[in-house]
Image (cartoon, rainbow, N blue to C red):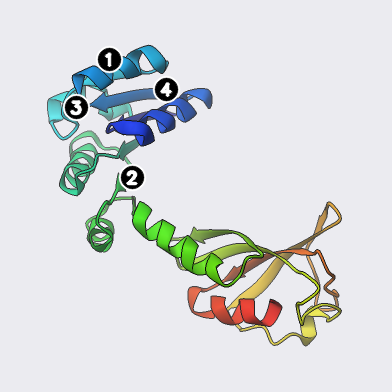
Amino acid sequence: MKVILIGDGKLTYFLGKKFVEEKHQVTIINAHSAEAETFSHQIKATVIFGDGTHPTILEEAEASRADLVLALTPHDEDNLVACQIAQQYYGVSRTIALVNDPSHQQFFEQIGITIAFSATQILANLIEKRADFEDIANFLAVDGGQIGVTEIILDENSSAIGKALQNLALPAGALIGCIIREGRAFVPSGGSLLQVGDRLILISQPEHYEQFLEVLT
């Protein structure tokens, strides 16, 4: 996969290294000459010094051949413009933009950016979701946040221990997709009994998420 990263700083640096390690063809566009030179020595990628919002720089980066463009600058307007040019002028099908101001995220998505992510919002969501449920291992939003996939671990304080799934008051928009027990994963049935230490993969719509957790934890 050909990936173009537009930005500077540690986020661009470590993402570039990660994509290279995964054997992708990486081009980095960096607007700071000294840092661009440093990147060129430290990352096995093509590094271009220039403004990633300028069509000629994107052309030099061979944007027309790119499978993915990530705009990671600290300026939302630059990230938006870079992704729009990549899509409209060079036919890039997948664009990802960092949104520094969370209030801009919806606008980015509305005008067609494939993925607009706010590090601030992601961190806030993680803190909120972990604040009261320390046994939640991870959370993944799917399909633009319409579905959430969560892993939780049942402890001895859960009221669901010893109960069959069919006897739990689970909300209609939620299900337990998988149980991992003693290193073995299986898809549960209605008669499956929950045990202490079970790792549950929960799939739910956002509006049912809190109720889902209350039933199990």
Q: Is residue 67 visible?
A: no
The numbered dot on residue 96 is 2
Q: Rate crowding at label 1 as few (under 14), some (14 to 19) or many (20 or more) other CA atoms within 10 Å.
A: some
Which SS class for mark 2? Answer: strand
Q: Amino acid at mark 3?
A: Ala
Q: Amino acid at mark 2?
A: Ile
Q: Which mark's residue is nearer the viewer, 2 or 1?
A: 1
Distance between mark 4 and mark 2 Cα atoms: 17 Å
Distance between mark 4 and mark 1 Cα atoms: 18 Å
Q: Nearer the viewer, residue 110 or 182?
A: 182
Q: Is residue 167 visible?
A: yes
The numbered dot on residue 31 is 3
Which SS class for mark 1? Answer: helix
Distance between mark 2 and mark 1 Cα atoms: 24 Å
Residue placed at 81% from the left, 64% from the top? 197
Residue corresponding to mark 1: 37
Residue corresponding to mark 4: 25
Q: Nearer the viewer, residue 3 or 75?
A: 75
Residue placed at 28% from the left, 39% from the top? 71
Q: Amino acid at mark 4?
A: Gln
Q: Which mark's residue is nearer the viewer, 3 or 2?
A: 3
Q: Amino acid at mark 1?
A: Glu
